[in-house]
Image (cartoon, grey):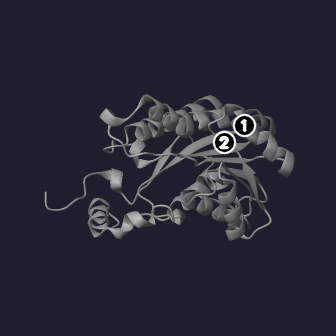
Amino acid sequence: MTTFENDVAVVTGAAGGIGVGICRALLDAGARVALADVDADGLDRAVEELGDARAVPFVVDLGDDEQTAGLPERVRDHFGGLDVLVNNAGIRQVTEIADLTPSEWRRTLDINLVAPFVLIRAVLPGMVEQGRGKIVNIASLAGLTAVRGRAAYGAAKAGLIMLTRSVAIEFGSRGIWCNAVAPGVVETPMTSSFFQDPAVTESLVQVTPVGRWGRPKDIAAPVIFLAGRASDFINGVTVPADGGWTAGYHAVGV
């Protein structure tokens, strides 16, 4: 028996490594999937990689409120419904506060926090009308604990965690579940060069109790759980998928 029974899921940031991993897991669990991203070529590559006719690309600029708000209707027009929203898209720059410009701050919040709000607001009426809907926001360990050079990113992800709770409080009684997954450091094609530095990889192992960094499938697994029916008594929570990083200080020799 499949988890989603042909339900329709939309995943933003679907052209990236984590996005593709989430889409693949949703397809494997029986969902039809709308892949949303601003990168048209990246979407084409993702659809080709997934190799499944149930994966359909939707080009959208999440920095544009009108395009963002219109995405759920486009998905419903194509698939005939919309059951799951995964807010995965995000941007990040590593800049310390003194060097961070107001425009960089606003852009980070626009994509990482405002766009999920706009999308959630747009999907809610249809989900409430059909009596059920699952929303999973991809937060970050940077939204749970401060990380040097990521003030804007961390503030946006912390805000996303609070938005997650707020949606659950306001709409849980109307058939809406809203939860979040907070990834730790994840290796993707885009970040693979980061892991070529032995000093970096040694540091990651030291601060992560499970002794390794994450991969897209490590994030996709809790997304599938939270988007499926097995989690129907869980609402408004944030699940750290970080190998234990945020559980406490794990580094040895101190």
Q: Residue at x 55, y 59 (%)?
A: 18
Residue 245 % position (x, y): 34, 55
Task: Name the quarter where the C terminus is drawn.
Answer: bottom left
Task: Name the quarter where the N terminus is drawn.
Answer: bottom right
Query: Horizontally, is 237 left or right of 64 in the view?
Result: left
Residue 122 % position (x, y): 72, 34
Question: Height in image: 110 above or below 88?
Answer: above
Q: 29 or 11, which is in the foreground? A: 11
Question: Height in image: 204 above or below 70?
Answer: below
Q: Earlier in the sequence, mark 1 or mark 2?
A: 2
Which residue type does callout 1 highlight? Gln
Q: 160 or 47, which is in the foreground? A: 47
- As helix, strand or loop, the secondary structure at mark 2 comes to loop
- As helix, strand or loop, the secondary structure at mark 1 comes to helix
Q: Residues within 10 Å of mark 1 (few under 14, many from 20)?
A: some
Q: Is residue 241 visible?
A: yes
CA distance separating discs 1 and 2: 6 Å
**Label 1: which residue?**
67
Q: Residues within 10 Å of mark 2 (few under 14, many from 20)?
A: some
**Label 2: which residue?**
61
Considering every residue shown, the one lying at the far left of the view is: 254
Which residue type does callout 2 highlight? Asp
Q: Residue at x 71, y 64 (%)?
A: 47
